[in-house]
Image: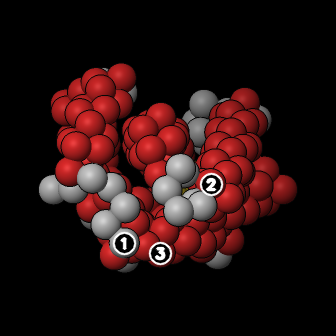
Amino acid sequence: MSSTKNLKNDHITIRRVRNIAQKCSENLYANKKVPLEHVEIISVIIEEFVDNFHHGKEETAYFPETKVKDGLAEDVRKFLIEHELGRRIAKMLRREINVLKENRGKEDNKVLPYNESKLNEPVARFLKSYAVFIDDHTGKEDKFFDLIESGNLLSEEEDKGLLKHYEACKNQVGGEIRIKEMLRLINYLEEQNWMK
């Protein structure tokens, strides 16, 4: 598999995360129950799989290699700015999850929604915002990746070097075992009743 195809495959998984975040947000806005633990799992997947692993591969390897190709530096700059936007949304989501946990009694701390809709709304909003971010961002990046592939802008040697770097990125986030755990958690969330 090429380094570009590897990133495009990540996007397929990331769109599954988008669907989960979107459905969770819709349920919260509709005052349907979602276990708080599930919202926390979504946040962990965003932080570890999307940001640390996938964006890590792009930022430390793929983008530095491709920004020098045929004037693509401006596209790369925009993607890096968008990554920062995604991080900020994820941090705000985590902050609001923590606010919910702090403002709830132990007995009520297991299931969303909470009676305090003003506490509920920010979590739903940031989940929705992250879903919109993923949809927009991965669409743009896929077009960029198609351009790289159609123009054969990466040599075989560059491609092999990127794939080696991806392995290093995987090791930095806990290795193959942690990536498999993230995928297992995505599957777990997709199977929940509130996702149906």
**Number of numbered discs present?**
3
Task: Find residue 128 and report its image quarter.
Answer: bottom right
Instruction: Give the residue displayed 27% in from the left and 61% down from the top.
Output: 5
Quarter of the N terminus within the rendering: bottom left
Q: Earlier in the sequence, mark 1 or mark 2?
A: 2
Residue 177 x %, y %: 19, 31
Labels 1 and 3 touching (C-beta < 8 A): no
Residue at the extreme right of the image, as rendered: 118
Q: Which secondary structure, mark 2?
A: helix
Q: CA distance from mark 1 to mark 2?
A: 16 Å
Reading the chain from its start, which is encountered first: label 3 or label 2? 2
Q: To which residue does mark 1 refer?
A: 151
| 102 vs 62: above or below | above
What's the CA distance linking mark 1 and mark 3?
Answer: 12 Å
Instruction: Answer whether residue 24 is visible to the viewer in this image.
Output: no
Q: Mark 2 belongs to which amino acid?
A: Ala
Which residue is at a point 64% across and 75% down the rendered structure image?
30
Residue at 37% across, 61% down: 153
Q: Is residue 181 left or right of residue 48?
A: left
State whether residue 85 is above or below residue 97. Answer: below
Mark 3 sits on what residue? 143
Going 53% across and 62% down the picture, which residue do you hit?
Answer: 70
The amino acid beneath tag 3 is Lys
Q: Quadrant of the C terminus?
A: bottom left
